[in-house]
Image (cartoon, rainbow, N blue to C red):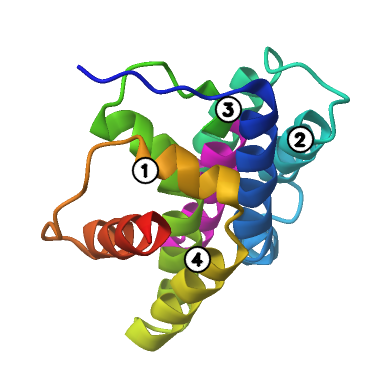
Amino acid sequence: MDQVTISEEDRRLLGAWAADCAERVLHLFEEKAPSDPRPREALEGIRSFACGELRAGPLRPLAFAALAAAREVGDPAAAAAARAAGYAAAAPYIHPLATPHQAKHALGPAMQAARARELAAGGDAGVGDEEIRWAIGRASPAVRGIVRQMPVFSPGRSRLDAFRHRLDAALRR
């Protein structure tokens, strides 16, 4: 199995990109669950990590809490938005083995943000595609370098698989 070489600075840059992607849809969660701070706390944590103010250790419980919020919210778009925040907080936890699961760690926040926007727009595929284009345009060379070390994704069958494939293919260019 291939190895991934990722520096601490690359993890921080990946975290910042992941937070940018997730933050674009956080309002979809907060509109449905205004008193639940868990996804916002996950984004605050990953932003602090990205700025060098926080070590990665505290991110794991923040990520799990945001994912729990996604399971509890009861609205598909809000759930996808909370998952985007949870996956953003987990983004620095990429392991040295280049596996599809690790690539999903890197791309998950953008994929879930696109799905959240699409669901909020009543299933309008153009809205999700627009979000994917935005994420591709915002990806730093470090994010692209991480993706290039991962296995290539096939198109798959689900909408999330399609988002992942588009992200993967575009970020390798």
Task: Choose mark 1 or mark 2, whichever is in front.
Answer: 1
Q: Earlier in the sequence, mark 1 or mark 4?
A: 4
- For the residues labelled 4 and 3, say whether their Cβ atoms are less than 8 Å apart: no
The amino acid on which the numbered mark 2 sits, given as a three-letter code, is Ala
Specify start and end residues of the magenta stretch as a single range.
72-89
**Residue at the disc numbered 1:** 148
- For the residues labelled 4 and 2, say whether their Cβ atoms are less than 8 Å apart: no
**Residue at the disc numbered 3:** 92
Q: CA distance from mark 4 to mark 2?
A: 19 Å
Disc number for residue 50: 2
**Residue at the disc numbered 4:** 136
Q: Residues within 10 Å of mark 2 (few under 14, many from 20)?
A: many
Task: Choose mark 4 or mark 3, whichever is in front.
Answer: 4
Under circle 2, the secondary element is: helix
- 158 displayed left or right of 164: left
Q: Earlier in the sequence, mark 1 or mark 3?
A: 3
**74 vs 61, nearest the viewer:** 61
Q: Earlier in the sequence, mark 3 or mark 2?
A: 2
Under circle 4, the secondary element is: helix
Q: CA distance from mark 3 to mark 2?
A: 9 Å
Q: CA distance from mark 1 to mark 3?
A: 16 Å
| Residue 42 seen by the camera | yes
Q: Is residue 64 above or below residue 16?
A: above
